[in-house]
């Protein structure tokens, strides 16, 4: 494969880079209006006890039905009592259900005015109701205290999110915000949204502790927009180097 036009990997990289001028503003917008989201930085003098107290408040929301009902191993729960969902839908690969019982079958773009009817969520004009995807279920059903905190914080179980990305998700994501506008007949979380956001910031500011012994975090890490921009920069450098235009060897299918 001596010509990059025949190399599907090179073609895909070039297609991505060709669209990067449009992509970066979109990613920045996802971080907040005008890309204005500013993550909380870890204090130079963090207070572990204050951080643990903050997570105890966060936990109250994470274990509430508005949050927990979709952070489960497979099928979602339903209602304030966290009942098994009826009809018996399942997560599906993308978190949007399995045909013919996909989330959008019942969940539209807005809440129903009827009490306890299926709620809705508008995502770019389309029904946006979903669970986390199968490859990263983000389930914390049955967990509490340090165990819950570590699942919530660990990038291997929280969707690959740094502390800054966690804050961004909790503070700006419209699916999270839905929990405080769930439609008639549904209980609100035990903290109001501004108070919850402040507890998230307080936890991060104080090193994001999960127990009394582990080392405190010293950095909040990158935002999603910053991480995506760094990825695009690396891809441009790789494409520009010509490293992908040739392979180290070719194979005609014969055995050595």
Image (cartoon, helix red, strand yellow):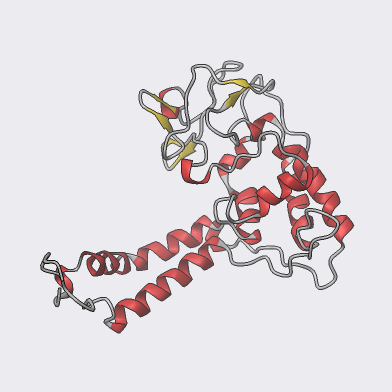
Residue 99 as seen in the image, left or right of residue 55: left
Residue 170 as seen in the image, left or right of residue 45: left
* In the image, farthest residue toward the front: 256
Q: Tell me the quarter of the picture where residue 49 sits.
A: bottom right
| Residue 84 in view in this figure | yes
Locate residue 217, reporting x and y percent.
74, 65
Locate residue 13, reporting x and y percent.
29, 68
Residue at left 53%, top 28%?
Answer: 75
Locate residue 178, reporting x and y percent.
60, 36
Q: With respect to residue 213, does 78 lie above or below?
A: above
Locate residue 90, reporting x and y percent.
47, 28
Q: Tell me the quarter of the picture where residue 51 sits.
A: bottom right
Residue at left 58%, top 33%?
Answer: 70
Q: With respect to residue 129, does 173 lie above or below?
A: below
Q: How many labels does the image show?
A: 0
Which of these two is toward me, 29 or 246? 246
Residue at left 72%, top 35%?
Answer: 63
Which of these two is toward me, 136 or 161? 136
């Amino acid at each position: 494969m001596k010509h990059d036009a025949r190399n599907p990997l090179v073609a895909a990289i070039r297609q991505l880079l060709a669209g990067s001028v449009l992509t970066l503003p979109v990613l920045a917008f996802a971080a907040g209006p005008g890309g204005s989201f500013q993550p909380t930085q870890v204090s130079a003098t963090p207070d572990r006890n204050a951080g643990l107290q903050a997570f105890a408040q966060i936990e109250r929301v994470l274990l509430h039905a508005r949050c927990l009902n979709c952070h489960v191993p497979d099928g979602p729960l339903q209602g304030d009592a966290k009942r098994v969902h009826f009809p018996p839908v399942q997560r599906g690969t993308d978190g949007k259900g399995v045909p013919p019982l996909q989330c959008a079958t019942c969940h539209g773009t807005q809440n129903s005015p009827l009490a306890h009817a299926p709620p809705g969520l508008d995502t770019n004009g389309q029904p946006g109701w979903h669970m986390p995807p199968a490859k990263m279920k983000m389930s914390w059903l049955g967990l509490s205290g340090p165990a819950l905190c570590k699942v919530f914080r660990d990038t291997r179980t929280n969707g690959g999110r740094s502390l800054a990305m966690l804050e961004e998700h909790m503070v700006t994501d419209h699916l999270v915000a839905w929990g405080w506008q769930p439609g008639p007949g549904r209980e609100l979380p035990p903290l109001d949204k501004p108070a919850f956001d402040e507890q998230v910031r307080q936890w991060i500011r104080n090193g994001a502790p999960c127990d009394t012994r582990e080392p405190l975090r010293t950095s909040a890490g990158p935002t999603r927009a910053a991480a995506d921009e760094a990825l695009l920069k690396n891809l441009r450098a790789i494409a520009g180097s010509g490293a992908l235009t040739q392979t180290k060897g070719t194979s005609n299918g014969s055995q050595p």
